């Protein structure tokens, strides 16, 4: 599991440009909303708690309730395709690879 708390932390993902773009883009929107509705002085202290899950993180998913939002992201590149899910909770945002999707507590 990789934890991203702010935009600077996304540098951990630079070796995976597609994932970096998805996380950086979504976190940028979260920051813009924070600045619109929150106190800009609190931004530096705010922890956005973005988690990038991987194999072995099934217990994390099994312990969760229903999310506020779940989005399937299909990425097509010249090298192939991949799928991941962005799953949003009030206190965290998860990016889940397709191979763990069966563990997500999503409504059918």
Image (tube, rainbow, N blue to C red):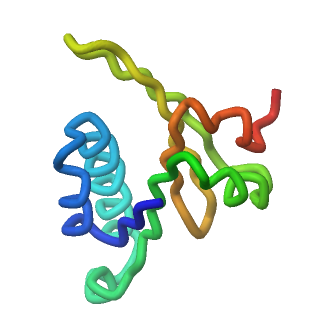
Q: From the viewer's perspective, tell me whether residue 56 is left or right of residue 31.
A: right
Q: From the viewer's perspective, tell me whether residue 31 is left or right of residue 95.
A: left
Q: Residue at x 17, y 49 (%)?
A: 14
Q: Residue at x 39, y 77 (%)?
A: 38
Q: Residue at x 51, y 48 (%)?
A: 54
Rendered image quadrant of residue 89: bottom right
Q: Residue at x 51, y 37 (%)?
A: 97
Where does residue 40 sit, x and y in percent of width and height? 27, 81
Where does residue 96 sit, x and y in percent of width and height? 53, 43
Where does residue 102 sit, x and y in percent of width and height? 72, 33
Pick whichever, 103 or 41, lies toward us.
103
Q: From the viewer's perspective, tell me whether residue 1 is left or right of residue 60.
A: left
Where does residue 91 sit, x and y in percent of width and height? 59, 69
For the view shown, which residue lies furthest in the front direction? 56
Pick whichever, 50 or 103, lies toward us.
103
Q: Is residue 22 above or below residue 34?
A: above
């Amino acid at each position: 599991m990789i934890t991203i708390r702010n935009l600077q932390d996304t540098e951990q993902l630079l070796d995976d440009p597609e994932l970096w773009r998805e996380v950086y883009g979504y976190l940028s929107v979260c920051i813009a909303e924070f600045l619109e509705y929150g106190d800009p002085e609190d931004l530096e202290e705010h922890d956005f708690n973005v988690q990038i899950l991987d194999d072995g993180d099934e217990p994390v998913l099994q312990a969760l309730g229903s999310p506020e939002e779940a989005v399937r992201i299909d990425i097509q590149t010249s090298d192939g395709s991949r799928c991941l899910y962005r799953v949003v909770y009030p206190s965290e945002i998860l990016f889940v690879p397709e191979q763990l999707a069966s563990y997500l507590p999503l409504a059918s």
